[in-house]
Each structure stands twice: as structure tokens, then as C-alpha cells.
């Protein structure tokens, strides 16, 4: 089963602070404790996460990359910082259409 984190395109207006290396690979994200704990679990099991980049400005949605979790740390009780490494660009059509506000999914 693969774990997907849903993110807005790097140029789209952001609610959470995220840093992208390029259009396909996030360096780090700010996310909810639930998503962060799931990332931590993937890190402990040495399993990658996939990044689902939402549609924006005429660019379709994509599972843009697969990467490993390098670090997870708590910012406060409502948010966490997750860093990624070892990116593999995918740019494939997603099988799931997340609902508005959905942060992650598994398939």
C-alpha cells in the first residue's frame, strides 16, 4: 500500500508553509500531527511516501514524486515539520481525486 501526501502546486496560494526544490520535489512541508505521525511510521519502516500535487493554473494533478522521510519534528500541538530526501520523479496520473482539504490517502 502506498501513502500519498496531498500538496498544492508550489506556486499556488498556500495555507501551510512548504519548500519545493522544483516542480516535482518538496524539500519539506508543514503538516498536521496525523500526517506527520504517518510519515514517521513510514520512515521507521524504511518505506517511501508519494507526493500528490494538486491541479493548478491549467496544470493537471500528478503523483509527482516518491521520496523518503528524513526527519519529523513537532512545531506546536497543531503542526509538524517533515523533511524529505531521495526523491524519484514520477509525474504520473493519480488514481485518486482528493476532496477539498484532504491531506493524505493510501491506495
Image (tube, helix red, strand yellow):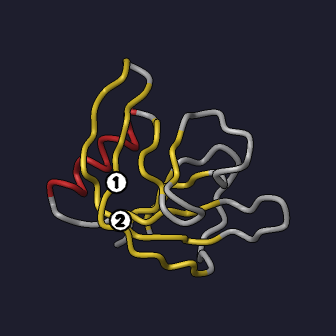
Q: What is the x, y in percent for residue 77?
A: 37, 18
- Which of the two discs, 1 and 2, labels the residue nearer the N terminus? 2
Neighbour tally class for label 1: few under 14, some 14-19, many 20 plus, Cα within 10 Å:
many
Residue at x 69%, y 68% (from the top left corner): 61
Neighbour tally class for label 2: few under 14, some 14-19, many 20 plus, Cα within 10 Å:
many
Residue tagged 1: 84
Residue at x 38%, y 38% (from the top left corner): 34
Nearer to us in this view, 34 or 47: 47
Locate residue 59 relative to residue 45 in the image: left or right: right
Image position of 68 with respect to 76: above or below: below
What whole-number distance in Å separates the C-alpha atoms at marks 1 and 2? 6 Å
Residue tagged 2: 67
Q: What is the x, y in percent for residue 33?
A: 38, 33
Residue at x 46%, y 62% (from the top left corner): 4
Q: Quadrant of the N terminus?
A: bottom left
Q: Quadrant of the C terminus?
A: bottom left
Locate residue 77 relative to residue 97 in the image: left or right: left
Q: Quadrant of residue 57?
A: bottom right
Locate residue 2 relative to residue 60 in the image: left or right: left
Residue at x 43%, y 64% (from the top left corner): 106
Amino acid at each position: 500500500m502506498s501513502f500519498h501526501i496531498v500538496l498544492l502546486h508550489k506556486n499556488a496560494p498556500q495555507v501551510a508553509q512548504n519548500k519545493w526544490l522544483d516542480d516535482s520535489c518538496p524539500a519539506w512541508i508543514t503538516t498536521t500531527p496525523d500526517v506527520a505521525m504517518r510519515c514517521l511510521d513510514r520512515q521507521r519502516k524504511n518505506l517511501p511516501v508519494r507526493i500528490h500535487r494538486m491541479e493548478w493554473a491549467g496544470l493537471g494533478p500528478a503523483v509527482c514524486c516518491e521520496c523518503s522521510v528524513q526527519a519529523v519534528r513537532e512545531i506546536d500541538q497543531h503542526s509538524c515539520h517533515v523533511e524529505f530526501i531521495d526523491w524519484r520523479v514520477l509525474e504520473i496520473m493519480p488514481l485518486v481525486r482528493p476532496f477539498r482539504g484532504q491531506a493524505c490517502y493510501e491506495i
